[in-house]
């Protein structure tokens, strides 16, 4: 078998491997983004895959030309380097082609960003406030507010019991929202910068003291979706998970009625906040 046939066979094998890996990468896996449960999250996922394949195509083209050139113009074949100082055609090509590629990526990316920023005509508004280390949710115009704190048992945290399925991703009171409803979120913080992130929604938002950030979502499928604080906010940063429970509109109204009847307390004191954080062996609070 000649060396050219070996090279050609290796190229075919590499291409097949890339195509097979790409097909598996598009499926749900721990190595890739997930499509999520909202239109925005699916738009972000499609945009991610589009740019991914553009980069794969560019990489194959660049490295293919480079390896072909190295092989066919090697010193052992007596190749002599070309002698030239400039080429107007080459300069135009390497300016125009990247510009076209960037524009082809910028147009769909801009469309997604514009959609993500449009929180108008929302049917429900929820204010999210980050604390060290728990979340406060307030349903504006509904007179419902409560704190949501980590509920993972201390025995699991400190190795006294087997870790559960949702270790460090479970709370005492989840954020309950209706499906098929455009929900506007207002984000702020009471102490330091936090970041509210639920991967299934397709975005995350910083919560900054003294500022109000805005975002929105519309969940299509009932279920429980989990997330975490993604801004290092102190020694209890790992202990402030997020749980969103999406239910039918009828179930949501029933839940609202129950919450209004409970008359949940308002903001906690610093001592209350500390008592909700996990404690170290010996009683030291995180």
Image: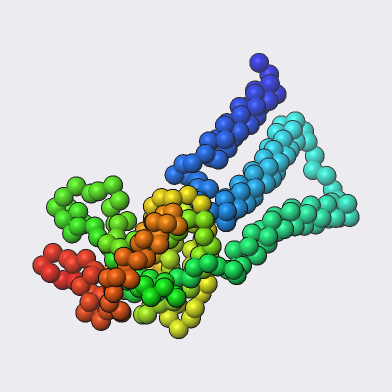
User: What x and y, as percent, mark residue 42?
Assistant: 57, 50
User: What x and y, as percent, mark residue 163?
Assistant: 23, 49
User: What x and y, as percent, mark residue 92?
Assistant: 85, 55
Visible residue check, residue 220 = yes
Residue 243's quadrant in the figure?
A: bottom left
Visible residue check, residue 206 = no
Instruction: State left or right for residue 143 relative to residue 172.
Output: right
Instruction: State left or right for residue 10 relative to residue 90.
Output: left
Image quadrant occupied by the C terminus: bottom left
Residue ID at (55%, 67%): 122
Residue 100's quadrant in the figure?
A: bottom right
Residue ID at (36%, 61%): 254
Q: Is residue 58 above or below residue 232?
A: above
Q: Depth check: 113 or 10 in front?
A: 113
Residue ID at (74%, 33%): 72
Q: Residue furthest left?
A: 282
The way the protein has been coloured in the rendering is rainbow
Q: Is residue 27 above or below residue 197?
A: above
User: What x and y, as percent, mark residue 249?
Assistant: 45, 57
């Amino acid at each position: 078998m000649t060396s050219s046939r070996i090279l050609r066979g290796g190229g075919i094998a590499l291409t097949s491997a890339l195509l097979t890996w790409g097909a598996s990468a598009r499926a749900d896996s721990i190595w890739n983004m997930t499509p999520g449960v909202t239109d925005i999250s699916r738009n972000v996922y499609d945009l991610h895959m589009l740019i991914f394949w553009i980069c794969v195509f560019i990489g194959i083209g660049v490295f293919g030309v480079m390896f072909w050139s190295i092989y066919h113009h090697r010193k052992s074949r007596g190749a002599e380097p070309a002698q030239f100082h400039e080429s107007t055609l080459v300069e135009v090509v390497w300016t125009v082609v990247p510009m076209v590629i960037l524009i082809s990526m910028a147009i769909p990316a801009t469309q997604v960003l514009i959609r993500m920023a449009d929180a108008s005509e929302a049917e429900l508004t929820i204010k999210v406030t980050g604390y060290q280390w728990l979340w406060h949710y307030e349903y504006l115009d509904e007179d419902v507010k409560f704190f949501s704190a980590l509920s993972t048992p201390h025995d699991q945290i400190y190795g006294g019991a087997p870790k559960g399925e949702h270790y460090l991703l479970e709370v005492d009171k989840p954020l309950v929202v209706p499906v098929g409803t455009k929900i506007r979120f207002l984000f702020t913080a009471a102490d330091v910068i936090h970041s509210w992130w639920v991967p299934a929604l397709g975005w995350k938002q910083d919560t900054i003291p003294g500022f109000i950030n805005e975002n929105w979502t519309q969940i299509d499928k009932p279920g429980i979706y989990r997330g975490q604080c993604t801004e290092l906010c102190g020694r209890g940063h790992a202990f402030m998970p997020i749980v969103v429970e999406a239910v039918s509109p009828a179930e949501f109204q029933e839940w609202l009625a129950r919450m209004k009847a409970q008359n949940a307390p308002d903001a906690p004191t610093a001592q209350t906040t500390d008592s909700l954080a996990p404690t170290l062996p010996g009683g030291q609070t995180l």
